[in-house]
Amino acid sequence: MNSKRLFLSFSTAILCLLFWSCNYDNSIQPETATITGETFGLNGTEPKHFLYDVKRISAVYGYDDMGNKIYFSADDYDVDLNRNTIARTINSAMPDFAAYSVNFNENGTFTFNSEPRNPPLSRQFQIYVDYIANENVKTINPAHGSFFENKPNAFPKIAVFGDSIANAAQTTAQYFQDTDADGFAGLLRSFLQSEYGTENVVVDNFSKTDMSIDLLVKDKEKVINGGYNAVIIEYGMNDHLLGVEGGAFETKLQELCTYFSENEIYMILVGFFQQNTKWDLEEPIYPEATLKYNEIIEKIAKNYNAPFIDIYNQFQGISQRKDLIEDLTVDWMHHPTDFGHKVYFSMLLPYFIKEAESSNSVANWVLY
């Protein structure tokens, strides 16, 4: 049995065992979709919607100050399957997001401060839910323009360059263990190495918090000198704060893509979502700058026949069911939760698979 089949068989067996032990119900079929760690900031007893239709809850939990999971009992929350919502109960032991406090300016905006932190991290107020979705498994197909379509005889050796988002800032693994395992780069690394072998796949993350596209301008030779054959470029969240026009950003991204294209490096360009509009640096440029910079990234990607990961519109769609700032950021500003990073990962994955994958076989990795 090859390593891929062995991995999938092992994953399926473990998932079935976990389903049985959590639910004491062996009627759950293996084709049922699994959602792992959807994040919520729950206020008082107000309900919030799940992203997918819930069939059965597997676990509800948070993290203590040491990074250990704290599981909550059924008395701590109320799930309404008809409305597809979850809420805290009156005497719940779950954290109440209503207690989250931010210092605002007189005009209703807030000014970021690192010490003491304002706004404070919101991750300690969030809860995580594992559940069985009332949907069938879907197939994840390789995307047009995928890595293997461009380089059929190679395995991916990926350099990731980005800001704090790509650096997995304040995700669970980064916050407690200083690794990017819960960020989209770490998720991609773990999946691809399990799929194609640790010896065949490299995903090195050169991203740095508080950085702009100038980091890649300065370090672009690392991609060539390091023997990488693919680069994921994730900038814009910090860069767009410079203003609406974006001319300097566009010039730099264009020059970088020319450089990588001339060196036959496979490129993926990643957009960014709308950060908290109450930040005093964002408020005067909302929404023009976010839209403009995403348009620049998308346009340049098309010019170079490179995939564009449209995070903005994906998150806008999710915002129809979830509060993006409360539910999908860990800093109440712009750093995605572990679950938010799964959205990024899910959009990147089709560009790095050789053949169709069942979402059940990657249930702990992928959204659909």
Image (tube, helix red, strand yellow):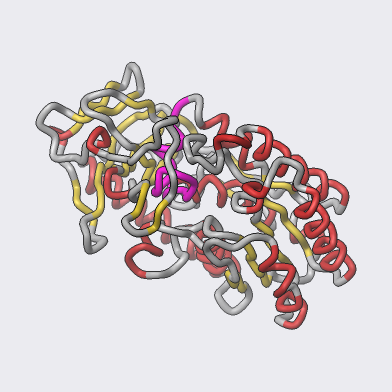
Residue 206 vs 165, above or below: the answer is below
Looking at this view, is 307 or 144 the one in front? 307
Most prominent secondary structure in the magenta stretch?
loop
Q: Magenta part of the protein: which range?
A: 321-339
Q: Is residue 339 left or right of residue 66?
A: right
Residue at horizontal 78%, vertical 63%? 266
Residue at horizontal 43%, vertical 69%? 179
Q: Residue lying farthest left?
A: 91
Residue 47 vs 314, above or below: the answer is above
The stretch drawn in magenta includes residue 323: yes
Q: Is residue 23 left or right of residue 230?
A: left
Q: Is residue 262 left or right of residue 32?
A: right
Residue at horizontal 30%, vertical 52%? 17
Looking at this view, is 315 or 76 the one in front? 315
Looking at this view, is 37 or 258 the one in front? 258
Quadrant of image for the C terminus = top right
Q: Position of residue 1 (x, y in %)?
A: 53, 68
Answer yes or no: is residue 34 visible.
no
The stretch drawn in magenta includes residue 312: no
Q: Residue lying farthest top?
A: 82
Residue 268 vs 29, above or below: the answer is below
Q: Position of residue 286 (x, y in %)?
A: 61, 33
Residue at horizontal 63%, vertical 65%? 160
Q: Position of residue 4 (x, y in %)?
A: 55, 64
**Would you identify the image quadrant in which residue 55 lies?**
top left
Q: Residue lying farthest bottom?
A: 225
Answer yes or no: is residue 169 visible.
yes
Q: Position of residue 73 (x, y in %)?
A: 15, 39
